[in-house]
Amino acid sequence: MPKASTQPTRLYRIAVPSPLRRTFDYLPASAETFPAQVGCRVRIPFGARRVTGVVTALVSETDVPVEKLRRVEAVLDAEPLFPRSLLSLLVWAADYYQCPIGEVFAAALPTRLRAGEGLVASDERWLTPLTAADDETRETQFAALKRAPRQLALLQLLLARESYSAEEIAAAGFGRPMLRTLQERGLADCVTVTPAPRPHFKNTLATASGASVLAPAVTAALTLTAEQAAAVAAIGAEPESYRGFLLDGVTGSGKTEVYMRAMEQQLALGRQCLVLVPEIGLTPQTIARFSSRFRCPVVALHSGLNESERLSGWTQARDGSAGVIIGTRSALFTPLASPGILIVDEEHDASFKQQDGFRYSARDLAVMRGRAEHMPVVLGSATPSFETLHNASLGKFTHLHLPRSTAALPRAAIELVDIADKPLQQGFSEAALLRLREHVERGNQCLVFINRRGYAPVLTCNSCGWRSECDDCIAQMTVHKTPPRLRCHHCGVSEPLPRLCPHCQSSTLDTFGLGTQKAESFLQRQFPHTPVIRVDRDSTRGKTALGDVLARVDSGESCILLGTQMLAKGHHFPNLTLVVILDADGGLFSADFRGQEHMAQLVTQVAGRAGRAERAGEVLLQTQHAAHATLQSLSNESYAEFSARQLEERLLASLPPFAHLALLRIEATEAEAALGFAATAAQISGQLAEDARLAVQRLGPMPAPMEKRAGRFRVQLLIKSERRGQLQDHLRYLVASLDPIKLPPRLRWSLDVDPQDMI
């Protein structure tokens, strides 16, 4: 459109949370208390809604006629929430991952800030105006509430001390509506308390006795091995500039100690440390270790926190009052007052890749953030991803090796148990049961690993052959015993467990296969005097459930841990001496080319839980394919040797890390609509590839490996190039061509750059 003839002196270019891949220009508010700066939030009209956007630029010209521009309603921040370096990274990420920029900024903000609330979270406190001296009034009110026992119980709670937070009241079992009822009766008041500004953590240390960042000597550092000392020296050589490191250490080699020594150097300089972990379950253990080691405040950021806790941790990181920030994937976008070091623990883990919406890799963006904010980045793993190993071989990362465990005894070897054509008891071989019994009788702890939750993967009818299948997915429904339900682990649909076959009305229903619940029941019968502790997503839904389990294991009592991959990641169980892996064969024949890499990482990580202290460890892996080259390699060689051989195969096949991929996914309630749009996208991609600058290879369109999920048919188009820049140019033009197309009803498409899950 032609430029307007009259231009205002200042306009705000704003990222708006919407599916549109662009920013929007707005006029300043009619009466601004203070002008918005780049990185500030503003409240704006957008269509018929009022939304919170982020200012990305101040401009003086626009392609939209001025009379058509709308005004900002309010500037919400007196200063930018994001520093320029982090704001630039978010803008770059929106372009690289082909994601609407408004969705990127929304993903980077805590929920309360996205909703337009204040940066400083006010603390809401509830109390009662009654006092201990109001005996007569109190008795009158108690009598009036005799027919409302829950209200009476809440009033008695409020009388017990000066005030309570809403979270504390909710934890006691009382909801906000009941508080409002007491408030209407004049028996409860709500007051808002704004917390005082917090000092920078370095100033807090300086006012304490001594200026050391270390906690008292009871948590003193361990003696470093020569390899650990060399790693610490390398990471600390240039503490205030970017360098990338791969800390490649076998399980039990002391990577966490290296992290803490490197963090100690940064904290002593008054710089903050950001540590990313793959799972919520690792956060309490990591926080406990770092809190006992360092005197500075340590905060957590993950989805298990309520919104008040999350905003509090975010602001403590931003204002510098927290020295150590530990979080999962999205914590990467947390602003730091004094960026010092960024550590990605278990960097190989697929959890660092967001699988919907803003499909970013936290590991890859961590490296980009380290460059932008001039801080070292450490990627740590016992089983590094092939991409990271390749980058280290090219010299992009300094490769630091920790080849030896700090345990007194050598690493436990993986012993293959061939179960082909062998009788099994509920999935357990005779060898596995015998070895479990031996270790339990010695008072040791054992771990049984099966990566399948539920009671059994399928319910079947012995009369007609019916199987429990999900109507909305091409998948079978899993049997759950507690409570008795059929559940689809792909779309979440749940239904009662039938007593009769829905097809032939026969009562000869039976379960097929093994899940964690069935294995738990079997082990409890086999070992009636030994606690069997199941750890999976179903058994650890409570906020403190996983922490309670880990505390029980840390007590050292003899037990059998039974669980999924939640137990494979970074946990340290010094009394665990036996690991039994029931079924790891699935990864050998995965439709995903990364299947064997992921299987090897999982097996190696699980095996690494055994023999981490003074007791020798053993690992048994049951398999139907004992002669398979991958299993033989894992049993007889190191992960490094296995990965080197796999990388040679990837090179020959021109697959990542030697090529770069993007996956266009199309979903629709009608298969024909999904296929039709996919064909259009493939045609446009082919036309673009006629230009040598945009040439790529394409595979598809084709049905996704799981063709139907949650009632939607899924089709995908794989786009590949050996040059990242060429792929990016192609994707920009492709997205620009697809965006204007009017979509059929209930069809949606998405682009996944550098996909980790091809299924």
Image: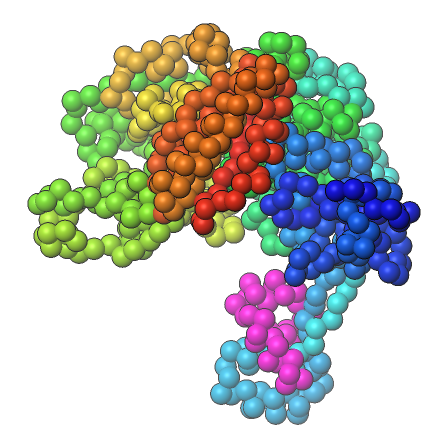
Question: x, y (%) of residue 314?
Answer: 71, 46
Q: Is residue 533 visible?
A: no
Q: Foreground residue, 400 or 376?
A: 376
Q: In the figure, 443 relative to 748: above or below?
A: above
Question: x, y (%) of residue 714?
Answer: 39, 38
Q: In the figure, 534 relative to 375: above or below?
A: below
Q: Which span of residues is magenta-colored? A: 157-186
Q: Residue furthest right?
A: 9
| Residue sitting at x 59%, y 50% | 305
| Residue sitting at x 67%, y 25% | 367
| Residue 189 picture quarter | bottom right
Quadrant, the C terminus: top left
Question: x, y (%) of residue 300?
Answer: 64, 43
Q: Main secondary structure of the magenta part?
A: helix
- How many marks the image carries: the answer is 0
| Residue 511 picture quarter | top left
Q: In the figure, 329 relative to 594: above or below?
A: below
Could you tell whether 492 is left or right of 75 in the image? left
